[in-house]
Amino acid sequence: MHAKSLLRVSKKRQKLGNGISKIPRLDYTEAMHELVRDTVFAPLCGTGTDREDHDDGDLAVAPAKPQLKKPPLYRVILLNDDYTPMEFVVQVLEQFFGMGREKATQVMLAVHTQGKGVCGIYPQDIADTKASQVNQCARDSGHPLLCEVEPSSDDEED
Ligand code: TYC
């Protein structure tokens, strides 16, 4: 890109009807198109030997596969204690884990009898947020209910 093209001055002077001539007009439009083409699009698209002029011969060129990976997953674990009311635990499971009444009651009873239980499996940031919300809600309500996060092995399968 040449500096010349950036500020190309129109040589034409426009004569007005009353004989007064205008100051030469700067023709930015074409220069700006060249600037954007050379500095924005060319590096993105590839030019010259990068792309347009490159001969692939007889080779079939397959588009690259997107290299995407599922995020690692984490379990949100609810812990039993002797003081949190069962009804409060059921409400927590409904509110933060989207469970219906029946499912929430089953999970609460499983935690009550087995000591702990899984409320859900999520990417790390979501798991951490849900555990924090449960712990904060329990604290605000004066209950010792605790929620933890642990890595899940469920994410190892493809
Ligand atoms: N064990 C509690 C009770 O008997 C109920 C309870 C269930 C508490 C599950 C916590 O994660 C929990 N009131």
Image (spheres, helix red, strand yellow):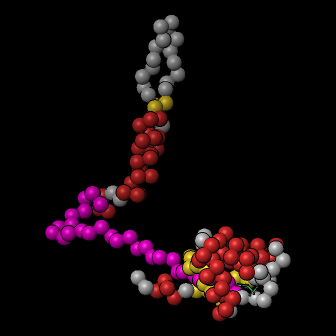
Is residue 60 one of those drawn in magenta?
Answer: yes
Of 38 and 77, nearer the camera is 77
Give the residues drawn in magenta, as a range.
51-79
Is residue 84 visible in the rendered structure shown here? yes
Please state the horizontal and vertical placement of residue 114, each as a whole percent of the image. Answer: 65, 93
Question: Please, which residue is most extreme toward the left here?
Answer: 58
Viewport quadrant of the C terminus: bottom left
Of 155 and 109, nearer the camera is 109
Q: Relative to 6, does residue 148 appear above or below in the rendering? A: below
Q: Is residue 88 left or right of residue 13?
A: right
Q: Relative to 129, does residue 36 appear above or below in the rendering? A: above
Please state the horizontal and vertical placement of residue 31, each as a whole percent of the image. Answer: 43, 39
Is residue 4 visible in the rendered structure shown here? no
Question: Please, which residue is most extreme toward the right here?
Answer: 142
Of 26 and 63, nearer the camera is 63
Q: Which secondary structure type mostly characterizes the magenta part of the structure?
A: loop
Residue sitting at x 34%, y 71%: 65
Is residue 66 one of those drawn in magenta?
Answer: yes
- Residue 98's image quarter? bottom right
Please state the horizontal and vertical placement of residue 78, each as a whole percent of the image. Answer: 67, 84
Residue sitting at x 44%, y 47%: 36
Residue sitting at x 70%, y 82%: 147
